[in-house]
Structures are given as structure tokens and as C-alpha cells.
Image (tube, rainbow, N blue to C red):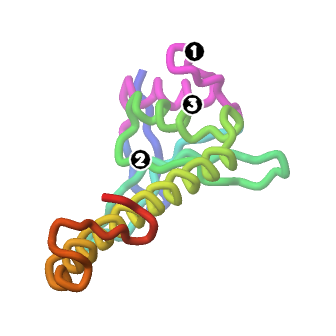
């Protein structure tokens, strides 16, 4: 059975089969996707001003109510299909350690930054060592002798 949804600007939207089923699964749950459902959540079709003047873009928004009774925006999507449930599961903070994930991402960024810095320093040390070996060879016993730079031996 199809339903009609009313928009804030007075317009109407026909909600057909799959979209209506997604709205039901948001509230009641979808065990195939690992979503337990939340009876406080609702799906709203919200109009936004587009990039071009006079253009209106509609996004489906999923709103919930937190433990303090305050409404919160759980997610936005241009479509109301099965991917909406998947995105809700992926963004569910009660299922995962959000702070731990943020700390882990930060550690990985810092490790990558340190690795990149060490690679650049090694490259500079190699270039400096080669320059010293070539240009100042006579002062250091000929071109055959290698000079360690910063305690590293090539």
C-alpha cells in the first residue's frame, strides 16, 4: 500500500513500496542488516536550496531522540533505499567505540607522518653523503671512501 507524505512547503510526495518498507525498518529493525530499530526515529523528506537559484533539492533525513529527549539528526541521504539502513548501522555509536576509533585514526596519521618524514630525511642524507663524497673527495681520502651521515652507514 502506498502512502502520501506531506512536505513542509505544502507539497506532496508519493511514498511507494520499498521506501515505505525502509521507513518501517528504521523504526522496527532489520535483522538482516544488523539494525535493531529505534521507535523514536522518523524519516523526513527535507527541502534544501540547491546550488542554482530557485533550485530545490530534497534529502531524506533520519531523526532520532536521544536519552535526554533532544532530537538529533542521525543521517541524510538523497535516496530512501536499503543503503539508508546500512548507513544507520555504520553510524550507530552504541555499537562501536567512537573515541577509540578516532584515537586509532590519529595514531595511524601520526605514524604515517613520521614514516614520511624519516623517508625524506634518509633521502636528504643520501644526497648529502653523495655530494660530500663527490665534491670533497680529495679532502677525505679519495672518492672510494664513504662518509656516514647522522650515524647511518650507507
Q: Residue at x 49, y 31 (%)?
A: 85
Quarter of the figure that contains the C terminus: bottom left
Q: Residue at x 57, y 56 (%)?
A: 106
Front-most of residues 110 and 86 = 110
Residue 117, by quadrant, is bottom left
Kindly indicate whether the residue at mark 1 contacts the one at mark 3 (C-beta within 8 angstroms): no
Mark 1 closeness class: few <14, some 14–19, many ≥20 residues within 10 Å: few
Residue 10 to residue 43: above or below: below
Element assignment for label 2? strand
Quarter of the figure that contains the N terminus: top left
Q: How many numbered circles does the render carry?
A: 3
For residue 77, the mark is 2
Q: x, y (%) of residue 140?
A: 26, 79
Look at mark 1 in the image and give the residue it sits on.
31
Sequence order check, earlier mark of 3 and 2: 3
Asked if the stretch drawn in magenta spans residue 38, the answer is yes
For residue 26, the mark is 3
Amino acid at each position: 500500500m502506498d502512502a502520501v507524505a506531506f512536505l513542509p512547503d505544502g507539497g506532496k510526495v508519493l511514498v511507494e513500496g520499498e521506501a515505505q518498507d525502509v521507513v518501517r525498518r528504521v523504526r522496527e529493525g532489520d535483522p538482516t542488516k544488523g539494525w535493531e530499530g529505534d521507535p523514536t526515529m522518523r524519516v523526513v523528506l527535507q527541502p534544501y536550496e540547491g546550488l542554482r537559484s530557485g533550485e530545490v533539492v530534497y534529502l531524506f533525513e533520519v531523526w532520532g531522540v536521544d536519552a535526554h529527549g533532544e532530537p538529533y539528526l542521525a543521517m541524510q541521504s538523497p535516496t530512501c533505499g536499503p543503503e539508508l539502513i546500512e548507513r544507520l548501522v555504520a553510524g550507530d555509536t552504541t555499537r562501536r567505540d567512537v573515541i577509540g576509533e578516532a584515537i586509532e585514526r590519529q595514531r595511524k596519521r601520526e605514524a604515517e607522518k613520521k614514516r614520511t618524514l624519516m623517508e625524506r630525511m634518509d633521502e636528504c642524507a643520501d644526497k648529502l653523503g653523495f655530494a660530500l663524497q663527490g665534491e670533497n673527495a680529495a679532502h677525505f681520502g679519495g672518492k672510494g671512501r664513504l662518509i656516514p651521515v647522522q650515524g647511518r652507514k650507507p
